[in-house]
Image (cartoon, helix red, strand yellow):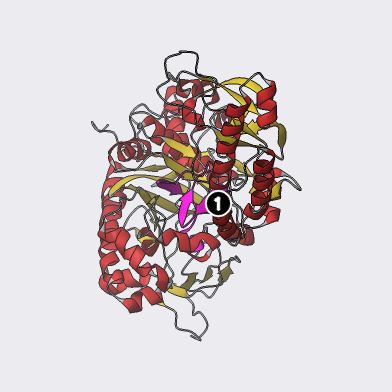
Amino acid sequence: MKKVAIHERPGWRQYAESVGFDFHTFDGEAYWDESAYYQFSLQQIEQDIEAPTEELHQMALSLVPDILADEQKLRLLEVPEPYWDWLAQSWRTSQPHLYGRLDLAYHGKGPAKLLELNYDTPTSLFETGFFQWVWLEDQMMRGQLPQGADQFNSLQDKLEQAFATMPLRQPCYFSCIGDNIEDKGTVNYLLDIATQAGIDGRFLALEQLGEINGQLVDADDFPVQAMFKLYPWEFMLREEFGQHLLTSDTQWLEPAWKMLLSNKGILPLLWQKFPNHPNLLPSFFESPGEASLRSGWVRKPLYSREGANIELIDPQGNKLTVDGPYTDAGFIRQEFYPLPKFDQSYTLIGSWLVGDSAAGMGIREDNTLITKDSSRFLPHIILD
Amino acid sequence: MSTSFKRSKKAALILMVPTATLLLAGCSTEEPVETAVYQNADECAAYYNPPAECQAEFAKAQQLHAQVAPKYQSQAECEADFGAGQCETPATTLAQNTTAATTGGTATDPAAPVQQQQASSGFFMPMMMGFLAGQMLNRSGQAAPKQSVPTQPLYKSRDDMSTYRTASNQPVARQSGPVSVLPSKMQPQPGSMVRRGGFGAQAQQRQTMSSGG
């Protein structure tokens, strides 16, 4: 694993915009960064990323029935009680799931450590599955990269297969907050792939979703039979239409049971069930009124996105916090594990799953140890 | 170099690239049907239709009105879509029906008790602005279309007061008179109490860049 500088493709910004990648730069800061790439060996990818990703995924799946059968665990995860039966029903009826992303700390050798699971609303999908793929093809064509270079990135192929084969009611609506440019980009990408797979997919801004007698309806008042939503389940349960989830005859992507696995409380539950697993870090639920954070620990809200509300103290006692809006639920504590540092940047690996198969990765860089929404995305290659 | 690649074989986009979207343009094989739009029974008769038929079709549309009109919980929500003073409760419908029935020469209105029950539910709906005369015109020996066009009430929305629309918001015509429509677009649905905007509040409160992670 190494970081290598490379010339940017001339005109890549115009190309990005022509394919709907409008958020390549945010607030004047680069988000897509192709001034360098990361290089891995095939063995690093297959042994240290791909195989542990599928193993960790199976471990996480094994927790779902445990949680559903245990009232105390449901309370620890702060799942509202009115939704318990509905949630269990989505698992019992094997509602299919589409995708997820594991965030891993990996130094090029030794076991990758699981920092968290993004199993409900994972993003950076388009950057990983499409734009990074095109970058590799372009750079090989331009002779900037050797012909034998490859990439751990079957994301788009696997998503298309998933849409072509999963039992999905149609039309399927693809939804997010209508004015969010990044989420819209991700949803458009999935809608594009689903369409290529033959799905009757349509965009619907989440705010446009209607309700008639407990049934969610589209803009023309027709029942919504299936919906992909890029919006957190924990928000939906607590909003005005939450109650209608219980009565609406609607298939959801991700299915309701995925909310259990996108909760940070899954990290202590994994550690309880698989103590000392090489890819896991010690994690615990924080008790109310517990003493302040000690050196070498990280504190994360049960519900959090993009590094928000994370507090970290490294073994030397250096403290780092990111403010955010997720202060209304419990916290977990996870043992500190350093991200590798390349030049002046800390590097995080996002390892994707489609269904239950590992499907590729995307790399994020930040100037700090906490990876955030604004962290840069860099492409990678496999080359031995 | 490995024989099996770890990356996708292709990465094509068909929707996100604007020039390619034409591929998806659907083509309909449905035949349009000739029908007509009138403001009321008098206008219908003024287009040389038999006055009795006009009256009957208008009454049919009025009867459907309470069933199919979009329903709102408050007057303000209804007026946001249909304009100030353009909404009513089923109670006022009753009053208008009675007037219409009286001018039409009918002594009693058998639907009145039902409508009084509905009035107690306290919802709001747009006023009927006209009606689609169904197949009143289709009596000249033409073959019947596969799907018929039912007589039904029409409405006008606040943002487009010149267009007659069905209860499910399908534009029909910009003026009274004959019009050709696709039957599949003109099937009345039971009008129901729709509410919107019940998801998305937390994203507004938290104002993050993305709802994902």
Relative placement, left or right, of B168 versus A360 is: right
Residue type at mark 1?
Answer: Val
- Identity of the residue furthest to the left in this view: B3
| SS assignment at label 1 | loop
Relative placement, left or right, of A85 versus B102 is: left
Is A215 part of what is drawn in magenta? yes
- Residue A291 in the image, given as x and y percentages of width and height: 50, 86
In the figure, residue A141 lies in which quadrant? top left
Q: In this picture, which residue range is highlighted in magenta? A: A208-236
Is A94 part of what is drawn in magenta? no
- Residue A187 in the image, given as x and y percentages of width and height: 49, 42
Query: Closest to the observer: B158 or A105?
Result: B158
- Residue B74 in the image, given as x and y percentages of width and height: 66, 57
In the figure, residue B5 lies in which quadrant? top left
Q: Residues within 10 Å of mark 1 (few under 14, many from 20)?
A: many
User: Would residue A275 be seen by someone viewing this image from the given angle?
Assistant: no
Q: Residue at x 40, y 73 (%)?
A: A81
